[in-house]
Image (tube, helix red, strand yellow):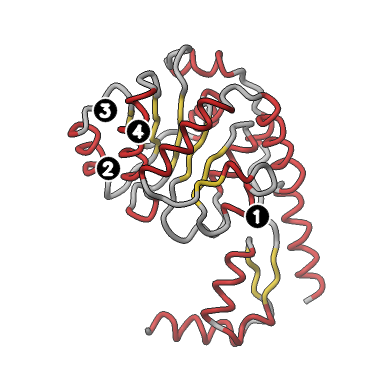
Amino acid sequence: RLAKKYEADIFARVRQIVVFSDFSRRVLAETYPGAERKVIQIIGGVDESFLEVSEPLESAREKLNLPLDRPVIFVVRRLTPRMGLDNLIMAMKEIVVVRSDALLLVAGDGPMRQELAAMIYKNKLEQNIRMLGKITDEELKLYYRASDVFVLPTLAYEGLGLATLEALASGLPVLGTNIGATPEILNQLDLELIIPDGSPKTIAKKIMWFLDEMLGNDELRGRSQDLAREKYSWEKSVDELEHIINET
């Protein structure tokens, strides 16, 4: 309650409030109705270095010592309950029944790391899920290029989804739950890329659809990168912010 009081006081004092998505705008309007008239939306940006990476999938996999003959699913997240990674792991339990060659790579660290590792061991998924821990920025770019699909299993509040934009900028198709701003991004590519809910069964079904119908779809990879380049560049974001500052 104290934090909300301070936030309300700050919003009352500022001239304008910048948000990165329609979702954030709605949350702000619902939480602080008086602040709604001050809200301006700027499209969030992605580092242009992700757009410049031209590493072929095969070359990226060789550098990362990844198999060339297995479908690779990638996710990079802070390992916390909100991210839904436990549901993604349980989804893999269903997927490997049909696709025993499927490989999930989980990058990132956080308080759930030991719990997730134990879940992988308990369900005998060690051959299908690798916990990568923290990785460097250069390694991250390689993993984006080496993977077949990025999965965002978020359960709550996704203000924009920088990892989603980085994946798209790298030419990596994204599947994401119908949470926060994720639908705003993926709707521009294909409604089928949105996972209706965060349950393991639904996540598994959507990943299986992708592996069966969209695996290796160069056209989708190209459109993903084009969307990031044309709409979510930092240059565009900075130009919009500069305009707001000059007008204030």
Q: Residue at x 77, y 63 (%)?
A: 242
- Where disc 4 sits, the SS reads helix
What's the amino acid at mark 2? Arg
Q: Residue at x 59, y 34 (%)?
A: 173
Q: CA distance from mark 3 to mark 4?
A: 8 Å
Residue 128 vs 243, above or below: the answer is: above
Q: Badges 2 and 3: C-beta atoms under 8 Å apart?
A: no
Sequence-first tag of 4 and 2: 4
Residue 238 vs 194, above or below: the answer is: below
Q: From the image, tell me which residue sits under label 4.
A: 92
What's the amino acid at mark 1? Gly
The residue mark sitting in front, 3 or 1, is 3
Q: From the image, tell me which residue sits under label 3.
A: 125
Sequence-first tag of 2 and 1: 1
Sequence-first tag of 2 and 3: 2
Other residues around mark 2 within 10 Å, as few (<14) / some (14–19) / many (≥20): some
Q: CA distance from mark 3 to mark 1?
A: 36 Å
Q: Badges 3 and 4: C-beta atoms under 8 Å apart?
A: yes
Q: x%, y% of residue 163? A: 53, 44
Q: Is residue 29 left or right of residue 218?
A: left
The residue mark sitting in front, 4 or 2, is 4
- Where disc 1 sits, the SS reads loop
Q: From the image, tell me which residue sits under label 1.
A: 44
Q: CA distance from mark 4 to mark 2?
A: 17 Å
